[in-house]
Image: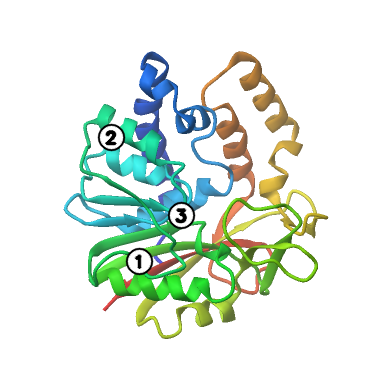
Amino acid sequence: MDIDLSDVRASERQLIASFSRFLFKGPFNKNIRNTKHFNEWYSLPMNYARIMEIPITKHTLGARKEHAILDISSPKSLSLYYMLNGFHDITITDVDSYFIDDFNIYKNEIGNTSAELLTFDATRRFPFDDNSFDRIFSVSVIEHFPKGGDSAAIKEIARVLKPGGVAVVTLPAYFTYMEEWTSNKLPWPTEVNEAGRDFFQRRYDRKEIDRLLSGSGLHSDYILVAETPIAPISVGSDGILKHNSYLVYDSLTSKVIRRLGRHLKLPYARWLAERCASARHHYLTTEWDNPEIRQVVLRLEKQ
């Protein structure tokens, strides 16, 4: 896929500039100030992993204002970006309704009242006609679908994507396939194994990506996000792979930034700490045998 780290950072700057214009009005706007998303984004508009995933998704999607766009992501910040920048034909979805009240407020405050907010279970048939959308994006979602739910979701993405349309899907990746089953109870529907652990997510290798896309009819390209490890990688007692996302505050710089931000109530304090870690550790590759890969971004095109 034709993208390098400078493209990612340029898209990141565009995202942060848009968020800033919106979020820094928040303290003076009671409606925005009282929303849960605002209070989270004011400190952390994108966490360590999303600092790469969301800008790559934006860059790769190539969305234009005349496009019909479907968001089936977990983080909603990219949808906010599109709403702030005059994209009106956007459908924002999730399995839960946690985002709807906040985004109804944002729609009214922005004046972008045509964005559609919808809840549905993406492990089942999508509630849209064939060939409905020019662009679809999914950040950090379908890896959590148990059993064959990930493949079913890809086939549904292919069904509702228009010919010539593009979908961008981000997934956890590793040089060898693994599944994370956790002792933590999860807030979404999942599968429970004999040990009583919940299915958390897959980490895809090249073979599993081929399985995932098999039969979808989508032309695919990809880029891998890798990281130089802060500490040796391990699986925690909760069953989850412990990599840099769980260790970003171990460095002195990150600890100082986070502490000052919390004490002084500075905007973007946590983001700055995690952005510093990203600058030190993140890089892009296309090599599936690299043990430092953590995420894959798939560009899927319907012929």
Residue type highlighted by circle 2: Lys
Q: Nearer the viewer, residue 85 or 186?
A: 186
Of the numbered discs in the image, which one, if any, rests on residue 126? 1
Q: Are marks 1 and 2 in contact (CB under 8 Å)?
A: no
Relative image position of residue 104 (x, y in whole percent): 32, 35
Which corner quadrant holds the N terminus?
A: bottom left
| Of callouts 3 and 1, the N-terminal one | 3
Q: Nearer the viewer, residue 37 or 193?
A: 193
Of the numbered discs in the image, which one, if any, rests on residue 152? none
Q: Disc 3 versus disc 2: distance between alpha carbons?
A: 20 Å
The residue to which callout 3 is attached is 95
* SS at circle 2: helix
* SS at circle 1: loop
Residue at left offset 51%, top offset 64%: 142
**Can residue 287 be seen in this snapshot?**
yes
Q: Are marks 3 and 2 in contact (CB under 8 Å)?
A: no
| Of callouts 3 and 2, the N-terminal one | 3
Q: Nearer the viewer, residue 115 or 11?
A: 115
Relative image position of residue 127 (x, y in whole percent): 31, 64
